[in-house]
Image: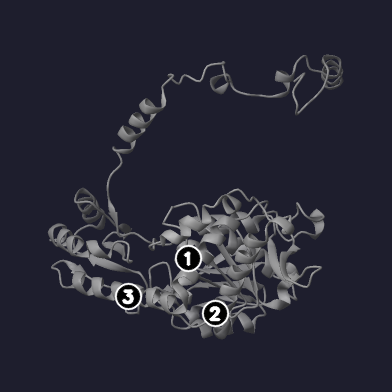
Amino acid sequence: MSGSPFAPHTDEETAAMLDAVGVDSEADLFDVPESVRFDGEFGIELRDEREVVAELRQLLGRTDDLTEFMGRGHYEHYVPSVVDNLSLRQEFLTSYTQYQPEIAQGFLQALFEYQSLFVELTGLEIVNASIYDAATALGEAATLAARVRQVDGDRILVPDLLREERRSVLDNYVDGAGLTVEEYPTEDANADVAALADLADDDTVMVYAENPTVRGTIEEDLDGVAAVADEHGALFTLGTDPVALALLERPADVGADVVVGDAATLGLPASYGMGLGLFATREEFLRQVPGRLVGASEDDAGKRAYTLTLQTREQHIRKERATSNICTNQAWVGLRTAMHAFSLGPDGLVELATECVERAEDLAARLDDLTGVSAPVHDHHHFREFVAHTDQPARAVADDLAERGFGVHVVGDHEVQVCVTEVNADETDAFVDAFEEVAR
């Protein structure tokens, strides 16, 4: 390491340190298997730019070209070009975190407007800016619930339909906090409130529900879920997203204490990994919010100014006082979400949400008319997506659809899930024709 700008030690200093720990070289400090050790060669043939571009085109050309009718937490809405044009400006794209408000006023204002947007949509007073994704937002909600609850308890109740990926992240979050996660049953894809009431007790810290549910249904008794949580002094956390919030009843009005979800349904295409964690809560929990908040104030000249007013991450404050060990955020993605929302405006956002209901209803009715198909499976209103029953095995139906250029989720032996938005709406005629062929 001698001469390294990151470890500027002389040979004598390095030798003294190695002697102190009883090894002969720096390499002895690491146990790297021989099979993965760097041997000085990357094994990558030298190519010029044209050759690299040609090879990448050939490689990407092997990817299946599917029109996706897939959802289950990953949704694609058309992102206006203004979002790219503005968010890709260098002052936004190269800004890591807005620690220096004097040079980041534009970014801070956008994040403040992002917070304001979700305050209006959720009815809750405090919105974080921001968290990794919906799964980590749910985990943070669970640990917040354990911190703020007035009496002891260790049970987190979640619906049995909760996506496996989100359940896994939640399990990891609560393991170190001494909490346990248990499932309550659903009936026809909505919460079985009576069964939930039987399961909940005074050891229940948090009750979680989703609206829309993972199977696309609109949850019809959120008041009942909230009442069960309230009876036992547990927090009621609701999972949702900004497009759905434009049309559904505000979470605060149905008793939600915390709202989580993926805010990147606006601002990003479906990326199957990249997201933006929505996290909103009541003002009484302000000091327990994970991450950071942007606030508005005045500068020395009396002009409106923005700054990070609350930072509760352990990299900012003493570990024992921190509410979260999240070490970065999704500020740039939040910027895109705000830009997308405000480019639509209130009327445009409601129109988009309304289309999510109407398109799903229309496509389900068209599939229901086909021989060998029944849709939707659940007797509820749906948002974006629905489950269809197929007389033929669902895996065979999905594979045959893929051969014809369409992707759907298999969610049961004879059930597929279909999602439609404005992005794939133009392909619904061809999709229905293909479905008719494979469902017989």
Q: Secondary structure at mark 1?
A: helix
Residue drawn at (66%, 24%) of the image: 31
Whichever of labels 2 and 1 marks the residue nearer the N terminus, that label is: 2
Residue drawn at (49%, 61%) of the image: 264
Decide if residue 327 is on the left or right side of residue 391: right
Whichever of labels 3 and 1 marks the residue nearer the N terminus, that label is: 1
Residue drawn at (36%, 78%) of the image: 354
Distance Cα–Cα, label 2 vs label 3: 23 Å
Look at the numbered discs 2 and 3 and tell me whether their residues touch, using CB distance below 8 Å. no
Q: Secondary structure at mark 3?
A: loop
Checking the image for residue 181, the label placed there is none
Report the quarter where the N terminus lies.
top right
Which is nearer the eye, 157 or 373? Answer: 373
Distance Cα–Cα, label 3 vs label 1: 32 Å
Residue 286: quadrant of the picture: bottom right
Q: Which residue position holds label 2? A: 251
Decide if residue 404 is on the left or right side of residue 39: left
Checking the image for residue 340, the label placed there is 1
Report the quarter where the C terminus lies.
bottom left
Look at the numbered discs 2 and 1 and tell me whether their residues touch, using CB distance below 8 Å. no
User: At label 3, which amino acid type do we have?
Assistant: His
Q: Position of residue 201 (x, y in %)?
A: 63, 77
Q: Which residue position holds label 3? A: 378
